[in-house]
Image (cartoon, helix red, strand yellow):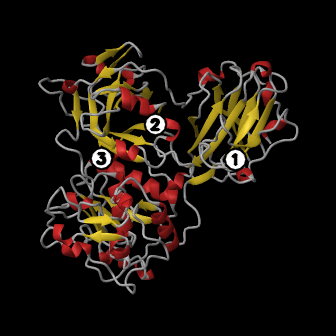
Amino acid sequence: MLSVVNLSKMSLLGVLCCLGLLLSPSSAFTIRRMSKEKSFAIDADEVIRRDIPFVNSGLKTPVVEGDIALNPGRNALVDPACRWKFPIPYILADSLDLNAKGVIFQAFEMYRLKSCVDFKPYEGEKSFIKFEKLDGCWSMVGDLQTGQQLSLGPSCDYKGTIMHELLHALGFYHEQSRTDRDDYVDIWWDQVLPGMDHNFDKYADDFITDQNTPYDYESIMHYGPYSFNKDPRYPTITAKDPEMTKVLGQYNDFSSLDLLRLNRMYNCSSSLTLLDQCAFETVNTCGMIQNRNDDGDWVRTMSQPGSHDHTLIGQCKDAGFFMNFYTDTGRAGDSAFLESRVLHPKRNLQCLQFFYKMTGSSKDKLVVWTRKEDAKGKVGLRKLVNSDDDHSWKIAHVPLTMDSKFRYAFQGIRGDPANSLGGIQVDDITLAETRCPSGTWRIKNFSEYMKSYATGEYIQSPRFYSPEGYAFGIQLLPNSYYDGYIGAFFHLSTGENDQALEWPAGNRQVTITLLDQNSDVRQRQSFSYSFTTSPTHLIPDSNILYWDNPSKMGTYDPSCDCYHGWTWGWNAYFSHYHLNSRSYLKNDDLILFVEFEDLTPLIKSEVPIKSPVQLRSQD
């Protein structure tokens, strides 16, 4: 175990300087007003409608139900012959927008994180999916066993849209096609566009199965209220429970029932990339262990007034637990370890995410370690967190590169027991085989910003760095130029690596994700938007490239002693109404992840399809 070495006595001075701490900066912000002259809004003309029936209006490809390019005749829900074998081979056609290619990989990662569905590059298999930019967003249903198309035309490059179309490819129809749908929703036939009635057909029990699950208003496969409507003022589909109408047509992520059905159909017993998670709601603490030789213990503690957990934030009686290392007793330098069970990675990169709170003395420390489970048992220090005056729950990420079985551990170190007011708390741990976010921004008391900031005023993020070394940030408008929405805009900044970087920074994908802070990563419906930078786009009325070094045309910001470039983003990034649903504002904290990723290797991605003769020769 880690604690057989007296790590608590090791000198931690200087460690903070060499570790890149992925913490969540949050401080008082200076109110600033966005310059419309130095920004570009992707949705400048109107709020983006992501609903597929709207995007597919005027579609020439014959489809049913709005986006299914195969007349109903067989259903993978009831016909095992139409189900895929994993991993599913794929081809990314060169016709695809570069942004769509990047978002496809985001969708793949969601399937891997939440199910056993996997994908691989095409290598001559008979069954495959070819993603192409055709005339809309559509897919065929089930594995046709001959290779098939999945179209991602204009305005289809959203993660939720691609996840939706992939569910069709995996064998699923729309939720409102269920046999029992009339018990739950009303179809307003007089509001449906002429000739579009067939899009609201429902199927008999012998064709479609609900897999013994309830009707799902939140399904990513459900139409929105205004699908195929004649008059934008009136819906075509509403829930019999009026409150449920507001959630119809969400394209953020899988619902819990979407996942249940997918995993039942494909016999998924676990996800591919989720290694571990724990909210400490069960007495076995997810198999985490402690050492009797430590100076103290981590204690599983139940929420109480003034000291609540992060999972349930103290809202449930006799529930809501977290692990607590008390630092108001014992001696300075005393420590205790909380170790995970042995974990078996399949990739060589992982991200450990957790929430923590430090309510003790200013000298307390929280350290994250890893240890390989082999003969040498190599121990590695991965993160050091110092206490501060902010006694609230914060998020942290620890990037790992473990390539064989290992454990991770939290070490709490008492700094000054005589002046401690509490201790060190940890909750809602997630370990997934994926890359940690490049930028993590936690904004405390966000509802207060929504009340106090006028239209167009923004909060400036800290400066972040991409894996390549580009500096960037975002400007968040609590009250955007579209009433009832948050605005989010990305910009490059000058940074310490500028002389070594490629300029302009074209063909990079920007992704801004609003975190759903559900303790179970599989149940989160985090929201993300992406766009990809162009290497040739010019600033209006100039010869300066939009994504060139901000020192050439940026605005100076004394808070970072740097220049910020022109911004690009969305006036209607996320609605105020939906912000107050789920766990987007848990503890009144809004948490954003920001990525800036090079997609240049995907510009040429298409591979030739082997002919049937070539395929038969392999049999």
The residue drawn where x is 32% and y is 41% is 573
Residue 545 drawn above or below residue 98? above
Q: CA distance from mark 1 to mark 3?
A: 36 Å
Residue 406, labelled with which disc? 1
* Residue 450, picture quadrant: top left
Q: Sort mark 3 into few (<14), some (14-19) or many (20+) by Cα contacts within 10 Å.
A: many
SS class, disc 2: strand
Q: Please tell me which residue is depicted at 33% across the width and 48% down the height of the picture.
A: 602
457 up-or-down from 287: above or below: above
Identify the residue at the far bottom of this view.
206
| Residue assigned mark 2 | 590
- Residue that badge 3 annotates: 99
Name the kind of residue labelled 1 in the image: Phe
Indicate which disc, 1 or 3, sits on the residue closer to the N terminus: 3
Toward which corner of the image does residue 385 lie, by quadrant?
top right
Image x and y of residue 349, in percent: 56, 45
Instruction: Work out whether mark 2 precedes mark 3 in sequence or the reverse, and give the earlier one.
Output: 3
Query: Please, what is the three-letter code of the amino acid marked with disc 3?
Result: Asn
Residue 11: percent from left, percent from top? 75, 21
One can see residue 64 in this view: no
In what quadrant of the picture does the N terminus appear? top right
